[in-house]
């Protein structure tokens, strides 16, 4: 999320959350952690956290954090933001200890891919490919404005959002670095996740018409007309999103320190409160609890864990 914009919105935040729906409909069912998943997971939930319980995860991070992703081997990575030096990609263990895996001038939103960790570099307008084993950082594409969040597509490209005021475009980037407009009409787009059937993209909009939007997706990967689906009343700056194996969408409501759960019918529940500066969300993979959301914090130096009672999909 754009720090300057969220600071400007902080004075408008009312620290009570309720919700309503717009547009109705059932939408699609979901994948997890930014990409379409396999669904039907039977992985056992951990017993040390209750549904809706919020736990600090690990000790203080060296800097505030934003992006989060698990790779296919179950390794956890977060982006740590430094206003005075290079940003870092941190590797995080199941005990919540961390170590730097790479650094670059700007590292924000994260996504995993078999080739490495994809990072949106908001300050430089680039999309990066990071090898956490070596620390190598290579640009995939440039000239993207202020890229915030990235999600890989079922057709092997990447979608990139930019939540700057006045932006309403989600770009598509190929592995050759070609950039094109995928869809317009989604104001200040931020977190994104595909449905399990790959026919809907859910998008959190942060500053203008904040809420949860849906973009229909055709079989050949073309975007349909976006619609605003959910409005979170009295809760500004929706940020990251994730989806569990039953199709429930989880949205980080940053300034009100909440995580909202939206079921496929559009019913909204505030599942967790006190998740300070909740930014990006990802369900546990590998040795991490599959029924917990791991959450970064935009203005704090603490990672969070939120129990959901439902597993995310397995990468």
Image: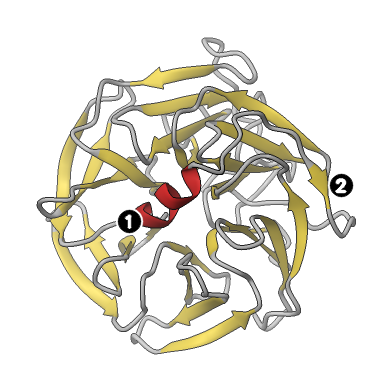
Q: Quadrant of residue 135?
A: bottom left
Q: As rendered, which of 6 and 90 lies closer to the eye?
A: 6
Q: Which residue is more in the foreground, 281 or 284?
A: 281
Q: Residues within 10 Å of mark 1 (few under 14, many from 20)?
A: many
Residue 191 in picture, x, y percent from top left: 53, 56
Q: Using the rendered image of the protein, determine whether residue 109 is visible from the camera's viewpoint.
A: no
* Residue at point 61%, 25% (across, down): 272
Judge from the rendering whether residue 251 lies leftward or rightward of residue 147; answer left or right: right
Residue visible at 83% across and 49% down in the picture: 21
**x and y, in percent, of residue 247 in the image:** 73, 46
Against 301, residue 104 (above or below) is below
Q: Residue furthest top?
A: 48
The label shown at residue 265 is 2
Residue 249: horizontal and vertical position, in percent?
A: 68, 45
C-beta proximity under 8 Å, tags 2 and 1:
no
The Cα atoms of the two marked residues, 2 and 1, are separated by: 31 Å
Confirm whether residue 127 shows in the render: yes
Work out whether residue 6 or residue 253 is closer to the camera in this orientation and state it. Answer: 6
Q: Is residue 49 above or below residue 195?
A: above
- Identify the residue at image location x=66%, y=23%: 309
Closer to the camera in the image, 196 or 142: 142
Q: Which mark is residue 108?
A: 1
Residue 136 in the image: x percent, y percent? 13, 62
Left of 252 or right of it: where is 114? left
Q: Residues within 10 Å of mark 2 (few under 14, many from 20)?
A: some
Disc 2 is placed on an element classified as: loop
């Amino acid at each position: 999320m754009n720090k300057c914009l969220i600071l400007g919105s902080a004075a408008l935040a009312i620290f009570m959350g309720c919700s309503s729906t717009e547009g109705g409909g059932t939408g699609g069912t979901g994948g997890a952690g930014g990409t379409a998943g396999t669904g039907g997971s039977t992985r056992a939930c951990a017993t040390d956290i209750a549904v809706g319980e919020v736990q600090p995860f690990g000790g203080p991070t060296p800097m505030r954090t934003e992006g989060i992703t698990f790779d296919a081997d179950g390794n956890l990575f977060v982006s740590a933001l430094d206003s005075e030096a290079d940003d870092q990609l941190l590797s995080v263990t199941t005990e919540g200890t961390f170590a730097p895996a790479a650094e670059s001038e700007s590292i924000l939103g994260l996504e995993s891919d078999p080739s490495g960790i994809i990072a949106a570099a908001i300050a430089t307008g680039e999309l990066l490919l990071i090898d956490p084993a070596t620390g190598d950082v290579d640009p995939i594409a440039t000239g993207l404005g202020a890229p915030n969040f990235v999600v890989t597509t079922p057709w092997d490209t990447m979608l990139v959002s930019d939540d700057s005021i006045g932006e309403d475009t989600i770009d598509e980037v190929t592995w050759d670095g070609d950039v094109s407009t995928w869809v317009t009409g989604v104001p200040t787009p931020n977190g994104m996740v595909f449905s399990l059937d790959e026919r809907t993209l859910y998008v959190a909009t942060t500053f203008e018409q904040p809420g949860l939007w849906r973009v229909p997706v055709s079989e050949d990967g073309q975007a349909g007309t976006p619609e605003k689906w959910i409005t979170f009343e009295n809760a500004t700056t929706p940020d990251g999103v994730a989806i569990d194996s039953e199709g429930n969408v989880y949205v980080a409501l940053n300034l009100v320190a909440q995580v909202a759960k939206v079921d496929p019918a559009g019913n909204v529940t505030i599942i967790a409160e006190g998740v300070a500066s909740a930014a990006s969300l990802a369900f546990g993979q590998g040795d991490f609890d599959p029924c917990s959301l791991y959450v970064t914090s935009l203005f704090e130096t603490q990672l969070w864990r939120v129990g959901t009672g439902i597993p995310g999909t397995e990468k």
